[in-house]
Image (tube, rainbow, N blue to C red):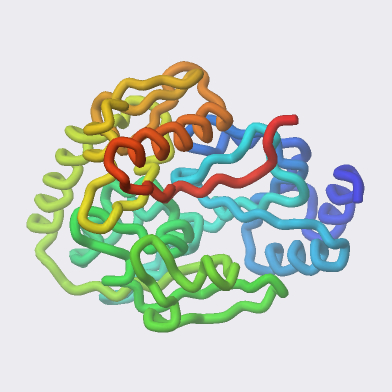
Amino acid sequence: MQVKAIYEGLSALIGPDHIKMNEPLKNYTYTKTGGNADIYITPKKYSEIQKTIQFANQNQIPITYLGNGSNIIIRDGGIRGIVISLLGLTEIHVEVDTIIASSGAAIIDVSRTARDHHLTGLEFACGIPGSVGGAVFMNAGAYGGEIKDVIESATVIDKHGDIITLSNEALALDYRTSIIQSNHYVVLEATFKLERGDVNVIQSQMDVLTERREDKQPLEYPSCGSVFRRPPGYFAGQLIQEAGLQGHRIGGVEVSKKHAGFIVNVDNGTATDYEAMIAHVQKVVFDNSGIELQPEVRVIGEPLQ
């Protein structure tokens, strides 16, 4: 099905206001890299997502979902078919000691909302640059806290367009993984169960974590965050540093001189540069230490032809 025909078919179903053709995805990723999406949609309602899924299934069109693009590399050839951005779903609602947040809301904003309502438990997320959906998808964590510690349930949509609610246990959250990934679900919203706390203590903890993050992470450059999973018994950044890779550059990307676990875009780098750097780091670290680094960042899309 041609891109124009997909656009016209979806416009008739959900209206053209939130649909774009041949949209540059580098505008939506933290690395500032990535080719174009054939069709890019930012739905505002769950029903619009359901209609899009049904249309895609009927016409055998692939769908890719994006959050805020903080832990992903989109290849330079872009993404064929339909890309659904969840950033139009941003509601955050507080009920006593519970917060219900839509998938496109920034997890940082949810942590700040918790603070403002004197709720503790999400301080660890005050510096995680991801959306709620992405945070649940990979059980995001930092400074000793993880999503699995505070999430009560998540509402998801499956590949048929059916909406399901999963409990904490049913989400099967583990280190950077969840049933969301293995079952190809998409998070629509998450419910967090928190505890009452002292707003000054909460703010103090957030200040400490923010300072630690700013001191150690190369926030001045575009990046996809921590690139590799933590190998059991080791730290990826330390292994990369010991392999002498800090400051190594391929094209426009570089292993950060500030934190070796980050690959930063210092000079108009491309997704191809990122993939080459990831492979190079894996090889050099293995040759140096015998440890195989596994990427935490997701790489999707088509290579540049």
Of the pair 252 and 67, the residue shown nearer to us: 252
In the rendered image, the vertical position of residue 301 relative to residue 180, given as above or below: above
Eyeballing the image, is 284 above or below 289?
Answer: above
Please give the name of the residue rendered at 50% of the width and 45% of the height, measured from the top-left corner.
72
Q: Is residue 116 visible?
A: no
Query: What is the x, y in percent for residue 291?
Result: 32, 47
Query: Relative to residue 140, is residue 297 drawn left or right?
Result: right
Q: Toward which corner of the image does residue 289 lie, by quadrant?
A: top left
Return the x and y of residue 222 as percentages of the image width and height.
42, 29
Measuring from the top left, give residue 18's x and y in whole percent. Answer: 70, 48
Is 56 or 194 nearer to us in this picture?
Answer: 56
Q: Residue placed at 86% from the left, 51% from the top?
A: 6
Q: Quadrant of the C terminus?
A: top right
**x then y, percent, for residue 9:** 88, 55
Residue 264's place in the image compared with 37, above or below, is above
Most foreground residue, 189 or 212 = 212
Q: Nearer the viewer, residue 271 or 149?
A: 271
Determine if residue 254 is in view.
yes
- Determine the residue positioned at 43% across, 39% down: 224
User: Residue at the location (35% across, 37% down)?
Assistant: 287
